[in-house]
Image: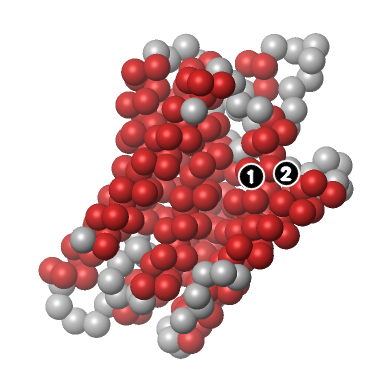
């Protein structure tokens, strides 16, 4: 029952975020920058405060290698998504002399969906009963906050590529289902396969932490102007880190 509630929030938050463009017509670049900065800071903070201590405390062999694998895997996924996961192409304000479409990432729609869905599926896999509730909740909250700007960017791309609202919502719904699907698969594996799977799920969490580290650091650099933070963004980053401290660590 608890996982159903988590799945509900993961799905509905993504849908509501993307559908918000129906009301506002287009994303506000300044607001999107702040959303990205907040989500990046929050992901980075929960990775170091909650997730990294969890996997290293169990002493799984070579866990650092799996964090590195996740980092590199995210680089590979961005060959398909062109960095949509961290708002690339939309975190920057448009030049007034050019049409907004000129600033859309040059990405094939099929490649984008494949890459972003793999990304979302992997993020959901550590939301499994093998981890304590605090780890599962940290992951869920982090993914929800992360998916808000992603959903806005995705919906903006879908609409500006000429998709109807109905089809854009269908594609967004498919993306929103991927994280719950990843969790369901892990829980199915956990319930159907006998034996100790703790090391297996520690490795998966390590991969996801690597993905989080790549995405969060990319966000924090790309939302800066000339790699310099103004006070508004700095406060937003501090807020994201501060809220992460409110999540229980044990």
Q: Nearer the viewer, residue 77 or 158?
A: 158
Picture coordinates of residue 162, whole percent (x, y): 47, 12
* Numbered disc 1: secondary structure: helix
Looking at the image, which is closer to me, 149 or 162? Answer: 149
Mark 2 Cα-neighbour bin, 10 Å: few <14, some 14–19, many ≥20 = many
Residue in view at x 39 percent, y 13 percent:
164
- On the image, which quarter does residue 84 sit in? top right
**What residue is rendered at 51% in x and 42% in y?**
148
Near-viewer residue (194 or 43): 43
The alpha-carbon separation of the residues under discs 1 and 2 comes to 9 Å
Would you name the residue on which mark 2 appears? 222
Task: Count how many numbered circles sit on residues in the image.
Answer: 2
Image position of 65 (left or right of 166): right
Against 87, residue 232 (above or below) is below
Q: Quadrant of residue 200?
A: bottom left
Tell me, yes or no, if residue 51 can be seen here. Answer: yes
Q: Image height check: is 99 above or below 5?
A: above
- Looking at marks 1 and 2 on the same chain, the residue that comes earlier in the sequence is marked by 1
Indicate the quadrant containing the N terminus: top left, top right, bottom left or bottom right: bottom left
Vertical position of residue 45 compared to residue 223: above or below: below
Residue visible at 63% across and 43% down in the picture = 35
Residue 36: image tag: 1
Q: Position of residue 135 (x, y in %)?
A: 43, 71
């Amino acid at each position: 029952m608890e996982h159903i509630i988590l799945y509900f929030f993961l799905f509905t938050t993504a849908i509501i975020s993307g559908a918000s463009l129906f009301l506002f017509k287009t994303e506000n670049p300044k607001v999107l920058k702040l959303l990205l900065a907040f989500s990046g800071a929050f992901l980075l903070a929960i990775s170091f405060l909650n997730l990294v201590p969890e996997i290293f405390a169990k002493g799984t062999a070579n866990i650092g290698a799996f964090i590195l694998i996740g980092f590199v895997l995210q680089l590979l996924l961005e060959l398909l998504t062109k960095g949509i996961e961290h708002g690339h192409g939309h975190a920057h304000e448009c030049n007034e002399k050019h049409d907004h479409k000129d600033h859309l990432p040059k990405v094939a729609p099929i490649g984008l969906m494949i890459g972003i869905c793999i990304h979302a599926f992997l993020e959901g896999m550590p939301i499994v009963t093998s981890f304590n509730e605090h780890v599962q909740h940290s992951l869920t909250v982090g993914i929800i906050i992360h998916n808000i700007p992603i959903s806005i960017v995705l919906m903006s791309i879908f609409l500006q590529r000429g998709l109807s609202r109905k089809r854009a919502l269908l594609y967004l719904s498919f993306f929103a289902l991927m994280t719950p699907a990843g969790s369901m698969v892990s829980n199915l594996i956990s319930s159907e396969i006998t034996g100790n799977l703790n090391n297996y799920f520690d490795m998966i969490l390590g991969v996801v932490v690597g993905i989080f580290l790549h995405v969060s650091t990319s966000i924090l650099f790309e939302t800066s102007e000339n790699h310099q933070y103004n006070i508004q963004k700095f406060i937003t980053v501090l807020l994201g880190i501060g809220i992460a401290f409110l999540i229980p660590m044990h």
